[in-house]
Image (cartoon, helix red, strand yellow):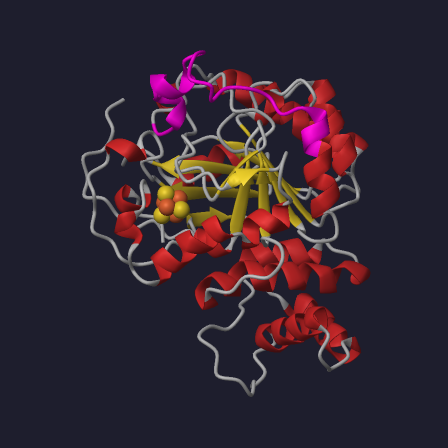
């Protein structure tokens, strides 16, 4: 399928959904819980409590004394996440979510990234038209970019992140279910974080993987699919098959409802809106009965940022204050748009996550972006993420 020859649009990372169905109505219950929490959070100079108090006050739309650039808001998918938390978890969740949403706007960081993205493997069985997996200089066996994370590296990252980062996403450049230790990784994560998300194309979603995912207590499972019919599905998800994926997701739903009825996992089908043929009504019609949410995100030319024209953009990229990526080989990168790690800031084998997050190299990138000089960094000069 041809890539769209459209004018390049700014890609807003803060809320990349361009449509979502299946979200909860009303947030009165969540507001009551936040009100109750606010009464228990002690005022003072404790950093955690200060953030949680501000998050509660903003969420309840209470007047605040400071003048701030942005107020924390409860987006519908965040309300859905909060609804599924236990009472004792709300404070930890708000501490994470406030920093995830507000710090990138205020260009603030603390000791740990609000979100850590861990890549179990960079290998994928698909060749989606909008993905870096179509770049032969990436997927060639000689490129050095392909591999699987060892369980030891994974445990090292998780041990440091536990109690510091609540949001862990398992996925990045490859299909996580292709990692041979994925089941063991899920087992190791259990009970350690409040916002664990897994992204998968569902091709390898067999019974064994389904039980491993449901037993892990992961909070969100995202199935990547962009169409409700063939041939469009496999024109976009090249090497994929709608029939197989549908069968696997139906099996997942059946096992979840029959054997894990108390699971609090949110399931979502999320597609990349790439052509005019795709529409959310069709997607909802097929997937809406199988998962909790159906969504589109906008297309971003992930398939090769390095060949895009320089765009002269000056607006800073918000992800520099939000996220840190750990590749399968321990290399740490600010984003996966830069899938060839030109911006790599180090390796977890020799530095801690916190050192890399606060370190000189990452700080230089933030300063360049904040000073509207992203054009001096490659590939930020060709990327449109803000
Ligand atoms: S390439 Fe630069 S601007 Fe684009 S997402 Fe990565 S850090 Fe942000």
Measured as percent of width and height from the top left, residue 230 is found at: 39, 20
Q: Which quarter shows the C terminus?
A: bottom left
- Inspect this view and state whether residue 257 appears: no
Q: Quadrant of ligand 1?
A: top left
- Inspect this view and state whether residue 317 appears: yes
Q: Is residue 291 above or below residue 85?
A: above
Measured as percent of width and height from the top left, residue 252 is found at: 67, 27
Q: Quadrant of residue 271?
A: top left
93 lies left or right of 68: right
Q: Quadrant of residue 39?
A: bottom right
The one of 47 and 16 positioned closer to us in this rendering: 47
The one of 304 and 78 positioned closer to us in this rendering: 304
Q: Which residue is at 61% across, 76% downward? A: 60
287 lies left or right of 130: right
- Whether 325 is among the magenta residues is no
Tally of numbered discs: 0
Which region is colored magenta? Answer: 130-154
Q: Is residue 58 above or below residue 238?
A: below
Measured as percent of width and height from the top left, residue 11 is found at: 34, 49
Q: Which residue is at 70% across, 68% downward? A: 48
Question: Which residue is at the far top?
Answer: 141
123 lies left or right of 184: left
Q: Which residue is at 38% across, 27% downward? A: 132
Q: Which quarter shows the N terminus?
A: top left
């Amino acid at each position: 399928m041809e890539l769209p020859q459209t004018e390049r649009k700014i890609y807003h990372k803060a809320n990349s959904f361009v449509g979502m169905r299946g979200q909860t109505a009303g947030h009165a219950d969540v507001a009551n819980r936040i009100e109750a929490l606010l009464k228990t959070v002690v005022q003072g100079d404790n950093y955690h409590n200060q953030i949680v108090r501000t998050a509660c006050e903003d969420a309840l739309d209470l007047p605040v004394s400071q003048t701030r650039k942005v107020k924390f808001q409860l987006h519908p998918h965040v309300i859905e996440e909060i609804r599924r938390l236990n009472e004792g978890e709300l404070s930890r969740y708000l501490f994470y979510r406030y920093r995830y949403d507000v710090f990138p706007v205020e260009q603030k960081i603390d000791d740990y990234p609000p979100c850590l993205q861990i890549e179990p493997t960079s290998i994928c069985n698909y060749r989606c038209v909008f993905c870096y997996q179509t770049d032969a200089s990436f997927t060639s066996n000689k490129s050095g970019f392909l591999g699987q994370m060892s369980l030891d590296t994974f445990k090292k990252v998780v041990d440091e992140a536990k109690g510091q980062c609540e949001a862990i996403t398992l996925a990045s450049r490859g299909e996580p279910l292709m990692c041979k230790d994925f089941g063991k990784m899920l087992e190791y994560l259990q009970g350690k974080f409040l916002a664990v998300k897994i992204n998968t194309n569902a091709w390898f979603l067999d019974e064994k993987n389904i039980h491993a995912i449901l037993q892990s207590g992961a909070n969100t499972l995202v199935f990547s699919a962009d169409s409700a019919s063939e041939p469009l599905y496999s024109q976009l998800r090249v090497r994929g098959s709608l029939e197989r994926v549908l069968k696997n997701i139906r099996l997942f739903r059946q096992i979840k409802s029959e054997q894990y009825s108390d699971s609090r996992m949110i399931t979502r089908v999320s597609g990349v809106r790439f052509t005019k043929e795709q529409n959310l009504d069709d997607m909802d019609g097929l997937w809406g009965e199988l998962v909790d949410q159906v969504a589109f995100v906008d297309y971003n030319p992930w398939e090769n940022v390095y060949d895009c024209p320089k765009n002269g953009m000056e607006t800073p990229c918000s992800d520099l204050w939000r996220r840190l990526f750990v590749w399968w080989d321990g290399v740490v990168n600010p984003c996966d748009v830069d899938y060839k790690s030109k911006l790599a800031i180090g390796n977890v084998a020799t530095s801690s996550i916190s050192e890399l997050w606060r370190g000189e190299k990452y700080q230089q990138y933030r300063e360049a972006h904040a000073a509207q000089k992203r054009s001096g960094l490659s590939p930020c000069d060709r990327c449109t993420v803000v």
